Amino acid sequence: MGLNKVVKDAREACAGIQDGMTLMVGGFGLCGIPENSINELVKTGVKNLTCISNNAGVDDFGLGLLLQGKQVKKMISSYVGENAEFERQMLSGELEVELIPQGTLATRCMAAGYGMPAIFTPAGVGTEVAIGKETRDFNGKTYLMEYAFDADFAIVKAWKGDTMGNLIFRSTARNFNPMMAMAGKITIAEVEELVPAGELDPDHIHTPGIYVHRIFQGVDYEKRIEQRTTQKRA
Amino acid sequence: MLDKNGIAKRIAKEVQDGMYVNLGIGIPTLVANYVPQNIEVVLQSENGLLGMGPFPFEGEEDADLINAGKQTVTTLPGSSIFDSAMSFGMIRAQKVDLTILGAMEVSENGDIANWKVPGKMVKGMGGAMDLVASAKNIIVAMQHCDKAGNSKLLPQCSLPLTGVHCIKKVVTDLGVFDIRDGAFVLLERAADVSIEEIQSKTAGKLIIPDHVGIVE
């Protein structure tokens, strides 16, 4: 049916992702990353990707897996520590890296989803981030003009989703996922629990299905913790 | 000289009842341990959380609930969760009252460098540039000198900048400084540190008022 966005699995969801494309990939660190889709991209071997993602995973998980396979041409991120293979490729010049402020990254995604070509932000004014960028003063303060992202695919992970593509995120696994979901020319959502349309309370939807083109029930989530920090019981 | 906890304890005195506060990684994180019990403060974590609580008890970690340092945390009663655009929206709109972060260098006109050392692996600025560009009240927590003994309070930053004209207060192991009118103004010194030592270790312009307090 026309508005049923459900596809069978990651393989069907990632169909059409080709060499040289630009992908947005949701998540903050390893929290809220689309594990199934990343694994599928590793399998397909698609190459020369430009990935817009806040971080680059770790060596053996998340986007680090695509880096291991040398599938990424360029990373656009705000913070890329915790990844030795990333460092090696960056220093050897194999991997192009564009570092941009985290809020700028989020808001450039948001702008794409809101149909706005650019935003103005003070982040980076007077720093190397501002080099070559247009500035404008408002109320005595200088702002940089930053363009909305243009991504072929956005790949996000949600907690629950319905067959019409409506999404609900859980806890801080929300992070970049909602704005990336809004920003892809084609948006793929993988979810921990896929339910029939009508089961989710419309008041609780974070991302309306209009933004989502393909949705599937994810499997075998590892949900790895990057920094396991605890306290002992008194 | 103040140790890391001493710096954090002193900064905690700047935290007032009713504030929304963003704490950076390192010494700033320790500030939370010294906020008085009798005031109410909400911690913002820029990955999308207001009302960050302590680390979870062993066995209660939730992979979906982390802070900006990717550590597992908890929520407190009254907390809220939101996406990254809204998180930086509230920072940009100056809804967050106080930002506390570390630095490699600070200059006498309030510039800060804390994200990149040429020749070393660059990890990225994360949210630091957004925070310093928008926060109305920023306190820097850092060591006064680097490991080689060079002053980190400078006439001009030598490292790539994170933000310009944005830092108003610096707390180091040696003392507490306001930055105003193109100079570091010594407000308080650590009990066992002389004004002469601070003078010799401060490369930027230093103003020493008639009265200099002792850090408690």
Image (tube, grey):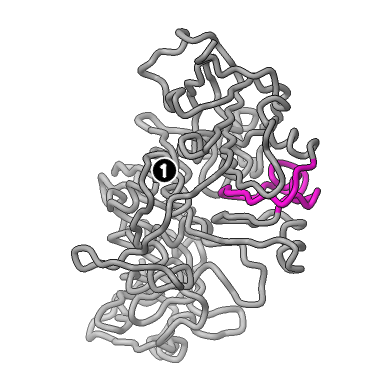
Span highlighted in magenta in the image = A45-72
Residue in the picture at 42% in, 27% down: A206
What residue is shown with label 1? A110
Q: Nearer the viewer, residue A109 or B143?
A: A109
- x%, y% of residue B67? 51, 43
- x%, y% of residue B179? 31, 76
Residue in the picture at 63% in, 33% down: A34
Chain ID, mark 1: A
Give the vertical position of B114 relative to A66 (above or below). Answer: below
Q: Nearer the viewer, residue A70 or A22?
A: A22
Kindly state the secondary structure of the residue where label 1 is placed.
Answer: helix
Q: Amino acid at mark 1?
A: Met
Specify whether residue A59 is painted magenta: yes
Q: Would residue B108 appear left or right of A2 to someone viewing this image?
A: left
Q: Nearer the viewer, residue B7 or A121?
A: A121
Quarter occupied by residue A80? bottom right
